[in-house]
């Protein structure tokens, strides 16, 4: 059982859970959260947000020298509330602190410090999007990027579709080769490094773009009919890893939080005319309130914003699962 010896004289998890908060590191999060558990939690979170049970206001920010501090918060009505804070010093996300409170008592139940919980949360949201929007027979994946966020997207994709092959491109030949090696070793999926983004996405059923680039890294014309795209990196007016050509070509345009998409400063490309009226809520797609893909030849795109409160939702799910094992 994880966490069993963290407090020495209290080996019983229930006693720990009731008497003091759990402090979780990246290694403990990685050991506790597999892809199916993470994706199921994120699916539940999106449904809860759509139903109004998860209260998740847009993020708040404060300027820092060379970056900014970001705070997101959430409240699962009657169960818990909590927040995540992180800084950005030229990067999409830095090290994070996630705090989980009991909504009935205010007691802090758990604190997670590091990058793993946030990365797996984002991967889990991407997995939900792929499961909801990609063709049911999708089996090939192209990824542009070779960092932590790219990895969790592939990790989640492999849990919702029987991947036959993955092609990988990033600026560093060594990093993309190592990334392909990791896919083969840890996921058991054939993977190969390729020399361009066009080669990575051509003829792929699923495409992931997860980079730190502030300018487009791919051309939407290279996408095959019927492809689904998960976009994870920058997507704002002044900096974006994809251009308007993707939004123009995508017939199904979805995000996990339309409110956050509008609340970005400056706003997300997809939240502005002429795209704003087409932007659908992933939670509403899951609930059947709005359609997702309606034909196999449609191109779909998921613009990930990271619905506020989902990190806390995932921390709560991890603690609850651990308490029963």
Image: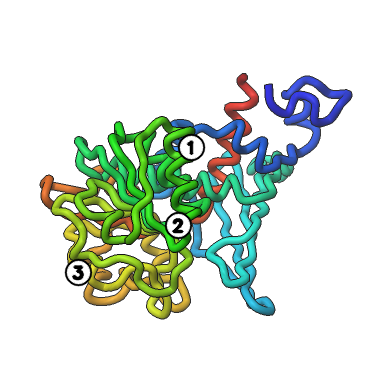
Query: Nearer the observer, disc 1 or disc 2?
Result: 2
Q: Which residue is mark 1?
A: 38
User: What x and y, as percent, mark residue 199?
Assistant: 27, 56
Q: Is residue 51 visible?
A: no
Q: Which residue is mark 2?
A: 173
Tag 3 and tag 2, C-beta contact below 8 Å = no
User: What x and y, as percent, mark residue 76?
Assistant: 53, 45
Q: Please state if 120 lies on the left or on the right of 245 as rendered.
A: right
Query: Residue 104 got which mark?
Result: none
Residue 268, quarter of the rendered image = bottom left
Question: Where is 190 relative to 199, above or below?
Answer: above
Indicate which disc, 1 or 3, sits on the residue closer to the N terminus: 1
Query: Nearer the observer, disc 3 or disc 2?
Result: 2
Q: Nearer the viewer, residue 32 or 22?
A: 32
Q: At numbered mark 2, what does the secondary structure look like: helix, strand or loop?
A: helix
> Residue at horizontal 31%, vertical 50%?
142
Tag 1 and tag 2, C-beta contact below 8 Å = no
Q: Which residue is mark 3?
A: 248
Q: Please state if 5 lies on the left or on the right of 292 as rendered.
A: right
Q: CA distance from mark 3 to mark 2?
A: 31 Å
Q: CA distance from mark 1 to mark 2?
A: 30 Å
> Residue at horizontal 67%, vertical 35%?
28
Q: CA distance from mark 1 to mark 3?
A: 31 Å
Residue 276, quarter of the rendered image = bottom left
Q: At numbered mark 1, what does the secondary structure look like: helix, strand or loop?
A: helix
> Residue at horizontal 69%, vertical 26%?
2
């Amino acid at each position: 059982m994880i966490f069993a010896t963290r407090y020495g004289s209290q080996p019983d998890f229930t006693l720990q859970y009731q008497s003091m908060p759990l402090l979780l590191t990246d290694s403990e999060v990685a050991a506790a959260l597999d892809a199916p558990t993470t994706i199921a939690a994120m699916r539940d979170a999106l449904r809860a947000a759509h139903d109004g049970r998860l209260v998740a206001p847009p993020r708040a920010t404060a300027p820092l020298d060379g970056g900014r501090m970001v705070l997101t918060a959430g409240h699962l009505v009657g169960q818990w509330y909590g927040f995540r804070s992180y800084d950005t010093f030229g990067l999409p996300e830095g090290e994070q602190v996630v705090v989980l409170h009991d909504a009935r008592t205010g007691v802090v139940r758990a604190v997670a410090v590091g990058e793993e919980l946030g990365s797996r949360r984002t991967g889990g949201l991407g997995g939900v999007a792929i499961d909801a929007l990609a063709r049911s027979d999708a089996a090939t994946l192209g990824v542009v990027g070779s960092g932590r966020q790219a990895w969790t997207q592939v990790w989640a994709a492999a849990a919702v579709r029987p991947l036959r092959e993955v092609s990988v491109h990033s600026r560093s030949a060594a990093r993309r080769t190592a990334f392909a090696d990791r896919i083969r070793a840890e996921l058991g999926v054939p993977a190969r490094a390729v020399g361009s983004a066009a080669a990575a996405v051509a003829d792929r059923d699923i495409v992931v773009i997860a980079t730190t680039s502030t300018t487009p890294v791919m051309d939407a014309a290279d996408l095959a009919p019927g492809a689904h795209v998960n976009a994870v990196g920058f997507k704002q007016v002044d900096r974006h890893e994809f251009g308007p050509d993707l939004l123009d070509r995508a017939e199904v345009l979805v995000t996990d939080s339309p409110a956050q998409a509008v609340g970005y400063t400056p706003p997300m490309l997809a939240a502005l005319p002429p795209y704003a009226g087409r932007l659908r809520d992933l939670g509403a797609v899951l609930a059947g309130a709005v359609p997702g893909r309606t034909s196999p030849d449609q191109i779909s795109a998921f613009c990930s914003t990271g619905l506020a409160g989902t990190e806390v939702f995932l921390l709560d799910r991890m603690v609850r699962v651990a308490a029963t094992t």
